[in-house]
Structure formats: C-alpha cells, structure tokens
Image (cartoon, helix red, strand yellow):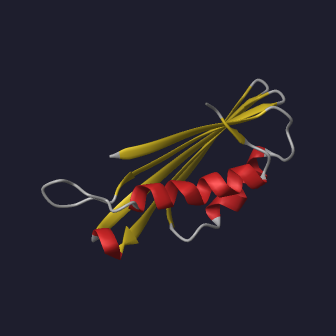
C-alpha cells in the first residue's frame, strides 16, 4: 500500500536545493539523491528508507521536487513497511510521508486537491 501527496508552491520562497537539504534532515537513511537541471527547470529526486519496528519492516519514501520558473512542485510517496499475509504497514508509510509533507508545508507548499 502506498500514500501519495502532491504539493505546489506558486511563489518561490527558497531554492529547490535548500528544500532538499531540509528534507534530507529527516530521521531516515538517504538511499540516493539525483539532481537534473534543464533550461530554466530543475528536478531533485530523494529516496529514503527507514525501519519501523511496529511493522517489522522497512518503509520507503520518495520525494520528487521540480521547478519550472517560479512554480515549484513536490510529489511525496510513502510505501512499503508491510509484512505478512495482508501486508499491513500499521501506518508506517503514512508516518514516513508525513515527515516530508510537514517540511514542505513549512516551506510554503500547498497540498493539491
């Protein structure tokens, strides 16, 4: 089971690299970070994993930050963390995604409906 949040920020408050730095500080292992820059656009991909004892497994978090001119977008995907016959994560993937979502909201991002 996965949880997906989509955020947007119409008025650029900080650079994408600064936002990525704030997200990297969450209590999890950064698996990889990739950055791509194009004509006036930028994309940063962050992938994390974290062990959750209550689910007895690892949950994963992917954050995709993108910028095109003054508009910044963020996709937050929490997944995994489940085990057993019903693959129950006991909310681990949601807790993991919420860590990044809280940081984005403090940076001026708004959840898309």
Residue toward you, 106 or 69: 106
Residue toward you, 5 or 62: 5
Q: Residue at x 76, y 23 (%)?
A: 39
> Is 86 on the left-hand or right-hand side of 112?
left
Q: Residue at x 44, y 45 (%)?
A: 3
Residue 48 visible in the shown view: no
Where residue 6 appears, x then y in whole percent?
59, 36
Residue toward you, 28 or 44: 28
Q: Residue at x 22, y 55 (%)?
A: 87
> Is 54 on the left-hand or right-hand side of 112?
left
18 in relation to 73, above or below: below
Where residue 1 appears, x then y in whole percent?
32, 46
Q: Residue furthest bottom?
A: 53
Location of the C terminus by quadrant is: top right
Q: Residue furthest top?
A: 39
35 in relation to 25, above or below: above
93 in relation to 12, above or below: below
Q: Residue at x 33, y 76 (%)?
A: 53
Where residue 30 appears, x then y in whole percent?
52, 62
Residue toward you, 110 or 15: 110
């Amino acid at each position: 089971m996965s949880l997906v949040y989509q955020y947007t920020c119409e008025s650029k408050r900080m650079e994408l690299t600064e936002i990525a730095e704030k997200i990297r500080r969450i209590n999890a292992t950064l698996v990889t970070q990739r950055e791509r820059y194009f004509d006036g656009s930028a994309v940063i991909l962050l992938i994390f994993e974290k062990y959750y004892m209550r689910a007895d497994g690892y949950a994963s978090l992917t954050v995709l930050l993108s910028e095109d001119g003054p508009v910044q977008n963020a996709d937050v995907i929490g997944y995994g963390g489940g085990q057993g016959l019903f693959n129950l994560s006991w909310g681990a993937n949601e807790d993991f995604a919420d860590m990044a979502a809280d940081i984005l909201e403090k940076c001026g991002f708004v959840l898309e409906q």
